[in-house]
């Protein structure tokens, strides 16, 4: 069945048309369908909700400042095993690991720092559901899974 995940192309990606096109090509070439898409500047309130599990981390403030600094592309992606496959395509969160061990991943190629790491992807079915509901309030995720 086609699993859903929430992907974010972060502000530094949107500022670079070449990088944006490369990542969009990778999405399509890896058999993801873009089910919904929005380009928007994430508000402070949305970012706080989205990243609530990180609120005690040392990088929380810089993460929120960056994520709200300009437009992001937010996609609902569908694929067989979408959550794991998107995370595999993104590569490791930390830029030194991505650049050292995973040069052919999105973060290996386009990550600039641990904060500006190019893309986000949900880490579980529960977080995919939660994250989709933050940015696509009218998307009926239960209907998606029940109608297949
Ligand atoms: P993301 O997948 O969006 O989920 C949490 C984000 O926190 C992560 O990508 C990074 O952008 C950011 N992050 C995680 N670890 C660090 C870190 N060590 N330093 C700075 N930012 C981080």
Image: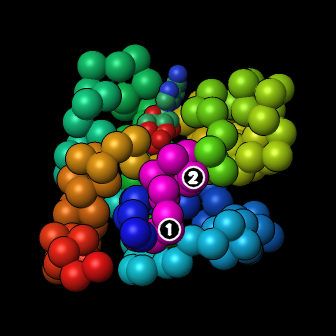
Relative to 147, residue 105 above or below? above
Residue drawn 43% across and 24% down? 59
> In this rendering, is residue 143 above or below 70?
below
Please name the residue shown 39% across and 64% down the image: 3
Instruction: Residue 49: say if magenta.
Output: no
Q: Which label was assigned to residue 79?
A: 1
Secondary structure of residue under mark 2 = helix
Q: Is residue 109 left or right of residue 72?
A: right
Q: How is the image coloured?
A: rainbow
Q: Give the range drawn in magenta.
A: 76-87
Identify the residue at image location x=40%, y=48%. 122
Q: Is residue 122 visible?
A: yes
Q: What element carries label 1?
A: strand
Q: Position of residue 28 (x, y in %)?
A: 66, 75
Mark 2 to mark 1: distance in Å? 8 Å
Question: Foreground: 11 or 81?
Answer: 81
Q: Is residue 108 left or right of residue 32?
A: right
Quarter of image, res 21: bottom right
Crowding near pointer 2: few (<14 within 10 Å), some, many (20+)? some
Mark identifier at residue 10 = none
- Image quarter of residue 30: bottom right
Q: Where is residue 115 in the image (x, y as percent from the top left)?
A: 55, 35
Number of numbered discs: 2
* Quarter containing the C terminus: bottom left
Res. 17 in view: no
Q: How crowded is mark 1: few (under 14 residues within 10 Å), some or many (20 or more)?
A: some
Q: Residue at x 51, y 47 (%)?
A: 84
Indicate which disc residue 85 carries. Answer: 2
Q: Position of residue 66 (x, y in %)?
A: 48, 45
Mark nearer the N terminus (2 vs 1): 1
Asked whether the beta carbons under mark 2 and mark 1 sit within 8 Å of each other, the answer is yes
């Amino acid at each position: 069945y086609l699993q859903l995940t929430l992907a974010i192309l972060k502000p530094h990606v949107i500022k670079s048309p070449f990088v944006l096109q490369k990542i969009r090509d990778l999405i399509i070439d890896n058999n993801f369908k873009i089910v919904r898409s929005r380009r928007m500047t994430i508000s402070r309130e949305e970012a706080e909700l989205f990243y609530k599990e990180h609120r005690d981390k040392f990088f929380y403030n810089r993460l929120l400042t960056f994520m709200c600094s300009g437009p992001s592309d937010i996609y609902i992606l569908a694929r067989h095993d979408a959550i794991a496959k998107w995370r595999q395509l993104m590569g490791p969160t930390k830029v030194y690991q991505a650049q050292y061990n995973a040069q052919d991943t999105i973060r290996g190629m386009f990550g600039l720092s641990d904060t500006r790491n190019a893309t986000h992807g949900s880490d579980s079915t529960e977080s995919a559901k939660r994250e989709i509901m933050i940015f696509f309030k009218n998307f009926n995720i239960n209907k998606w899974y029940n109608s297949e």
